Image: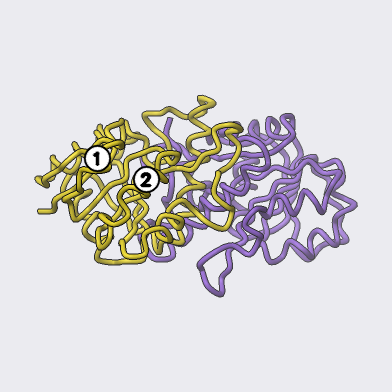
Chain colours: A purple, B yellow
């Protein structure tokens, strides 16, 4: 069983804590602002808004060395709702990997609305978590947590694919914001 | 009823011809190489590989003025299978719109595998076509064709969203190529 630290206590943080606990893993949840409290998990989920990433990384960069760091952020430009705030040829995950050269960064959960992580289902099927990263062991560790919690996991390729995962999420979020799709649904991965 | 010209007789062209005919629309199908045969449809679907676009546009740019031009291409870099051939801040659809300033370009069908267009279903649900474009009337025309054929249509926003639709498709195609998902499935849009 893995020990998992989740930074952030919002909808996503709670849903992922529930998922991990359901699979029998131990979980610690930390507030975004508790930067002086060390993380003890081998997997650390940054369940914070993209706008909070910089401060979390600033206070915890040393603690995150060697850890599997899970990025679920979507760098949406909320002033326009018409694009991402990261450069077009980059991604939030790539920026985190650059800021944490000793961490094993994976992108995951950013294409799942919180409700579908909590319920375990989307449409008629099981919620699937797309996981991208350059470290196969890190992806396998997280994949085990996801499947032990009753969801499906799909290896989405290298960390470079975070760019497409963030684009996917931008599309999904703009559609939900315009009520074209529901916040309890979205894009489902079918077999 | 609309009159629809489909350039390209491959899997996608055939599936979209079937869809349009099912909805009671009239359809003409043209070979990619029949550039001297005029298109007569008010909607023209460019059902060709991205690599064939330049020659189709070169031979038909004048004919396409004023038409609703549907771009379904995915500019995958097939030498690496690791990215798109268009600049990161652009899209195939944006390049077509630039090449055809008098046409009303919409991006559609590029997120649907041909099998799901032909069968009308994906997973347990109905196939949904995501349609992006800057001309509301053009999107509505195409949306009517899609829904008359028994599929669902979702307005995915402005033509700028083609960038995310192409990223979405890159991810979907790389997953299918690695057998992580099936070519008869993929990403389904749930309510």
Residue extending furthest bottom? A79
Q: Which residue is tagged 2? A: B72
Residue B38 visible to the viewer: yes
Residue B72 sits in quarter: top left
Residue under the point 20% across and 43% down: B37
Q: Which mark is residue A134?
A: none
Against A31, residue A143 (above or below) is above
Which SS class for mark 2? Answer: loop
Against B180, residue A131 (above or below) is below
Percent of width and height locating residue A137:
74, 29
- Give the mark, 2 or 1, whose residue is nearer the N terminus: 1
Residue B185 sits in quarter: top left
Q: Nearer the viewer, residue A186 or B36?
A: B36
Q: Is residue A17 left or right of residue B49?
A: right
Question: Mark 2 touching mark 1, by CB under 8 A?
Answer: yes
Percent of width and height locating residue A110:
58, 50
Residue under the point 9% across and 45% down: B24
Q: Nearer the viewer, residue A20 or B99?
A: B99
Cα distance, mark 2 to mark 1? 11 Å
How many residues crowd mark 1 within 10 Å: few (<14), some (14–19), many (20+)?
many
Residue extending furthest top? B179
Q: Is residue B62 left or right of residue A141?
A: left
Percent of width and height locating residue B164:
49, 53
Are callouts 2 and 1 both on one chain? yes
Residue B190 visible to the viewer: no
How many residues crowd mark 2 within 10 Å: few (<14), some (14–19), many (20+)?
many
Q: Nearer the viewer, residue A191 or A125?
A: A191
Which SS class for mark 1? Answer: helix
Q: Chain of mark 2?
A: B
Against B86, residue A177 (above or below) is below
Q: Which residue is tagged 1? A: B16
Residue under the point 43% across and 29% down: A191
């Amino acid at each position: 069983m893995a020990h998992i630290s989740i930074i952030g206590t919002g909808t996503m943080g709670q849903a992922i804590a529930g998922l991990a606990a359901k699979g029998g893993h131990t979980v610690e949840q930390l507030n975004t602002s508790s930067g002086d409290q060390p993380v003890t998990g081998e997997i650390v989920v940054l369940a914070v808004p993209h706008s909070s990433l910089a401060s979390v990384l600033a206070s915890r960069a040393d603690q995150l060395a060697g850890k599997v760091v899970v990025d679920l952020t979507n760098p949406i430009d909320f002033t326009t709702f018409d694009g991402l705030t990261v450069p077009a040829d980059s991604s939030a995950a790539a920026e985190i990997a650059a800021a944490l050269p000793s961490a094993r960064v994976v992108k995951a959960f950013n294409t799942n609305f919180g409700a579908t992580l909590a319920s375990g289902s989307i449409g008629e099927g099981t919620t699937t978590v797309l996981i991208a990263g350059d470290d196969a062991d890190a992806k396998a560790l997280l994949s085990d947590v996801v499947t032990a919690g009753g969801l499906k996991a799909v290896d989405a390729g290298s960390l470079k694919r975070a760019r497409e995962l963030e684009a996917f999420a931008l599309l999904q979020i703009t559609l939900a914001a315009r009520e074209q799709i529901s916040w309890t649904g979205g894009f489902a991965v079918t077999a």
